[in-house]
């Protein structure tokens, strides 16, 4: 079997459709179908179930797929090692980040990195945190600039190289009665409101796959609010903050992100006591025991210097 055959089977399995896989591989659909048939003939059994809903892997296909992922990762690591041998004259970096963090971070990192390594090809994937973790596990990413999970122990397969910490704040309408219950405390940017006082409030939440939502759920859990009343679930924290400013509910937002507001609507912001551990850490995430090329290591070093 060749690396091309491994890639064919992996792509068809990922796409669950010959036509889409052929487009992704830039080959004709009949050629791909014939190649898959030859691979199955050489293995001696079908790798795919052909159903009306698409292609699914047989048991033998699942074993082939897992082997293909591992072998293709070995090929990829070898290409990165060749880049090292070439002393960064050529090579690739595939990194991931979240949409909003990419806006804040990459503009600080990329000009300096590209000035030093203009011949390194960069591919950047902007996804939510859960998807980035999946891509790291499958070998699609070298590393990711993201935020740590609420509990690092839940992700023992990753290295989290922490760069800086950003606290969360509560965003709510400027005339909300709870503002009068907040107390000024030294060391906090805004008056502090006990999270327990939000138990009867309506929340504007992001989706569970997003790190802001995961941190929010952990903080509410520590305050004993296990089933918050949620009026709206959406993907954009800016929209949640805008709606909170207009009195449609309360939402949690990282302090750094809270500075991105509408010119017309500004929410009131309240700090959260440290006992609730309402914060996230910006970090470089990579697989434990994973290979990082010289180009990866240089990018990470520049990222730390620019963002820490």
Image (cartoon, rainbow, N blue to C red):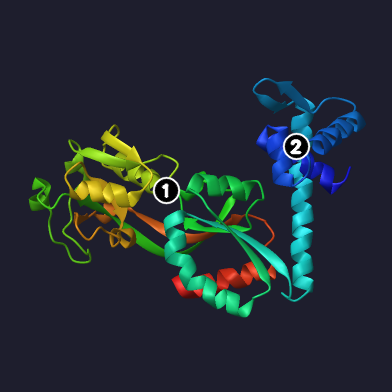
Residue 42 falls left or right of residue 234: right
Residue 211 on image: x %, y % = 42, 48
* The C terminus sits in image quarter: bottom left
* Residue 269 quadrant: bottom left
Q: CA distance from mark 2 to mark 1?
A: 30 Å
Residue 18 placement (x, y as % from top left) = 73, 33
Q: Is residue 308 visible?
A: no
Give the percent coordinates (x, y) of residue 77.
Answer: 75, 58
184 sits left or right of 17 in the view: left
In the image, taking residue 304 as reference, residue 32 lies left or right, namely right
Residue for point 17% across, 47% down: 246
Going 53% across and 71% down the picture, which residue do you hit? 110
Q: Is residue 15 above or below residue 127?
A: above
Would you say the residues marked 2 and 1 are in contact, meaning their CB atoms lie under 8 Å apart?
no
For residue 222, the mark is: none
Task: For mark 1, give the secondary structure.
Answer: helix
Q: Height in image: 212 above or below 298?
A: above
Residue count near mark 2 (Cα–Cα under 10 Å), binned few <14, some 14–19, many ≥20:
many
Residue at disc 2, secondary structure: helix
Residue 114 located left or right of residue 32: left
In the depicted structure, whether residue 46 falls above or below residue 204: above
Which residue is painted at 90% across and 29% down in the image? 41
Q: Position of residue 23 (x, y in %)?
A: 70, 43
State the mark number for residue 211: 1
Q: Looking at this view, is 259 or 280 the one in front?
A: 259
- Pointer 2: what residue? 65
Quick one: which residue is furthest to the top in this view?
52
């Amino acid at each position: 079997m060749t690396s091309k055959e491994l890639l064919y089977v992996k792509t068809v399995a990922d796409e669950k459709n010959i036509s889409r896989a052929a487009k992704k591989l830039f080959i004709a659909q009949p050629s791909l179908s014939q190649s898959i048939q030859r691979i199955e003939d050489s293995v001696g059994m079908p790798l795919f179930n052909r159903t009306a809903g698409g292609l699914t892997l047989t048991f033998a296909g699942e074993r082939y797929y897992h082997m293909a992922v591992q072998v293709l990762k070995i090929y990829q690591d070898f290409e990165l090692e060749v880049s090292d041998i070439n002393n960064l004259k050529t090579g690739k970096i595939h990194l991931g980040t979240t949409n909003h963090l990419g806006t804040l971070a990459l503009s600080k990192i990329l000009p300096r990195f590209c000035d030093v390594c203009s011949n390194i090809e960069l591919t950047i994937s902007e996804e939510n945190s859960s998807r980035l973790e999946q891509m790291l596990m499958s070998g699609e990413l070298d590393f990711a600039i993201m935020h740590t999970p609420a509990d690092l122990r839940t992700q023992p397969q990753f290295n989290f190289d922490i760069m800086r910490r950003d606290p969360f704040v509560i965003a709510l309408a400027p005339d909300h009665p709870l503002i009068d219950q907040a107390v000024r405390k030294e060391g906090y940017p805004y008056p502090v409101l006990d999270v327990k006082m939000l138990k009867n409030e309506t929340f504007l939440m992001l989706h569970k796959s997003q790190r802001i939502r995961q941190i929010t759920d952990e903080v509410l859990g520590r305050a004993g609010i296990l089933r918050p009343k949620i009026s709206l679930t959406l993907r954009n924290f800016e929209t949640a903050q805008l709606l909170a400013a207009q009195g449609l509910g309360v939402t949690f937002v990282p302090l750094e992100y809270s500075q991105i507001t509408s010119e017309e609507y500004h929410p009131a912001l309240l700090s959260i006591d440290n006992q609730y551990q309402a914060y996230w850490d910006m970090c470089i995430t990579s697989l434990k025991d994973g290979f990082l090329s010289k180009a990866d290591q240089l990018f990470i070093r520049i990222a730390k210097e620019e963002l820490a």
